[in-house]
């Protein structure tokens, strides 16, 4: 892997715009999907160093959430309540015509100074789609649909008289005014071969489910190679769930309590739905295809990233991920507002200090376990003093 060029690592948080918190567990979660609460979280997050927030997309009750706010309108509310924070609105292509979303996004960019981003979600929740009357395509077809969707977005954002005739979306001689001065960044997730190939062709950012350092490094290499083959570069986000406490023992105890109090029926129901979607791929590389019960208690395998411990331990692990090519950490929290603030006050400054020391050429050892993991993954580990 090339010498370190991507620092400083960026931080994002999951917006709790759906009920039930960010883990499917009966453990206490001091959080709320209420808009006023979320405005407070967004303002706190940008104050303590978070650059992005991701607003979830769900329409019907699922996976522990009985109530949910729509993602694009909620994102606009958070953007209007903040000054610097970028908000990533998750959208499903099968619920939108991309020309309509493109117009919404162009207006939002004008209003907010270019701070809207989009996460194009090819989808796993079949029942939601079919209950709302849209066509549910097979796995790889959904990624073809998403690619057409993104192509049309970019076309009407940048060209006059844009036309596109596709299998899923069409537009003819479209000229929008105003076109956004700053095009929204386009994020996508997915673990399958189809998802990675799509990312290499059209997306700005590729989101990964929670992974070990080695697993993240492998995906960075694979998708970077696909992007390079298309004459492009791409950035990488990694999902994680942060439990930062005064001692590692305390943090690990909270994690074990979350898992012990998991809502078994809801977790197993979610697991059945997403693993059916993941295993629908030809090579069985879909998201969640190898997730275990413990992993599924938190959105997108967040526990696997291992951000559990003291502020110093978590900061060093964040840097290790950065060293293998992760550009952004997308974080979930148990008690969202108070833990977003604590992470920003206790962990982000430590990460910035480590980055600066590394940039200054200081010999910097992260600890034997992390140094070994980064080295094995092909990242850059400075020699210890």
Image (cartoon, rainbow, N blue to C red):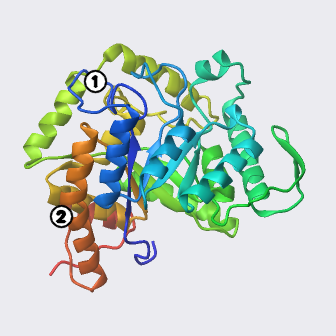
Relative to the observer, which residue lies in front, 152 or 380? 152
Residue 100 in percent (x, y) is at 74, 42
Q: Earlier in the sequence, mark 1 or mark 2?
A: 1
Residue at image coords 37%, 44%: 39
Residue 331 appears in view? no
Q: Which numbered marker is on residue 339?
A: none
> Residue at 22% across / 29% down in the picture?
258
Where, quadrant-wise, is the N terminus in this rendering?
Answer: bottom left
Marks 1 and 2 close (CB-CB < 8 Å):
no
Which residue does the image show at 33% across and 25% down from the upper left?
24
Secondary element under disc 1, as helix, strand or loop, is: loop
Q: Is residue 261 above or below residue 45?
A: above
* Label 1 sits on residue: 25
Q: Viewer-nearest of labels 1 and 2?
A: 1
Q: Position of residue 2 (x, y in %)?
A: 46, 76
Q: Which residue is mark 2?
A: 368
Q: Quadrant of the C terminus?
A: bottom left
Q: Is residue 362 above or below residue 267?
A: below
Does residue 105 lie above or below 326 as drawn? above
User: Residue placed farthest to the bottom in the image?
Assistant: 361
Q: Position of 287 compared to 383: left or right?
A: right
Q: Extreme top residue here?
A: 265
- Compare residues 297 and 111 and report the one nearer the observer: 111
Compute the Cα span from label 1 to label 2: 34 Å
Circle 1 packing at 10 Å, graded few (<14), some (14-19), many (20+), is: many
| Percent x, y of residue 8 | 37, 70
Q: Is residue 234 visible?
A: yes
Image quarter of residue 224: bottom right
Residue 335: image quadrant is: top left
Q: Is residue 204 left or right of residue 240?
A: right
Q: Which residue sits at x=85%, y=56%?
A: 175
């Amino acid at each position: 892997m090339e010498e370190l060029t991507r620092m400083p690592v960026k931080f994002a948080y999951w917006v709790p715009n759906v009920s039930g918190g960010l883990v499917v567990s009966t453990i206490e979660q001091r959080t709320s999907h209420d808009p006023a609460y979320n405005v407070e979280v967004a303002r706190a997050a940008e104050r303590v160093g978070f650059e992005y927030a991701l607003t979830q997309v769900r329409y019907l009750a699922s996976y522990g959430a009985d109530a949910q706010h729509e993602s694009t309108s909620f994102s606009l509310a958070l953007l209007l309540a903040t000054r610097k924070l970028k908000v990533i609105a998750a959208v499903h292509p099968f619920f939108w015509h991309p020309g309509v979303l493109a117009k919404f996004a162009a207006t939002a960019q004008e209003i907010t100074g270019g701070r809207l981003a989009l996460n194009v979600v090819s989808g796993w929740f079949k029942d939601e789609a079919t209950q709302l009357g849209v066509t549910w395509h097979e796995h790889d077809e959904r990624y073809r649909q998403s690619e057409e969707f993104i192509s049309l977005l970019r076309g009407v954002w940048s060209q006059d008289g844009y036309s596109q005739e596709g299998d899923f979306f069409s537009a003819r001689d479209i000229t929008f005014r105003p076109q956004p001065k700053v095009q929204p960044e386009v994020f996508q997730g997915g673990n399958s071969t189809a998802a990675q190939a799509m990312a290499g062709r059209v997306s700005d950012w590729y989101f990964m489910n929670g992974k070990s350092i080695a697993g993240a490094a492998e995906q960075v290499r694979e998708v970077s190679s696909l992007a390079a083959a298309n004459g492009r570069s791409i950035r990488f986000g990694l999902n994680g769930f942060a439990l930062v406490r005064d001692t590692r023992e305390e943090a690990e105890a909270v994690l074990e309590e979350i898992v012990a109090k998991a809502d078994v029926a809801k977790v197993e129901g979610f697991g059945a739905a997403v693993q059916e979607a993941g295993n629908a791929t030809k090579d069985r590389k879909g998201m969640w295809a190898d997730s275990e019960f413990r992993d599924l208690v938190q959105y997108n395998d967040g526990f696997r990233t291992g951000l559990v411990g003291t502020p110093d331990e978590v900061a060093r692990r964040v840097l290790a991920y950065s060293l293998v090519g992760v550009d952004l950490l997308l974080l979930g929290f148990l008690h969202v507002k108070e833990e977003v603030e604590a992470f920003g006050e206790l962990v982000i400054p430590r990460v910035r200090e480590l980055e600066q020391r590394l940039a200054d050429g200081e010999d910097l050892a992260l600890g034997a376990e992390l140094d070994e993991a980064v080295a094995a993954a092909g990242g850059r580990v400075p020699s210890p003093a």
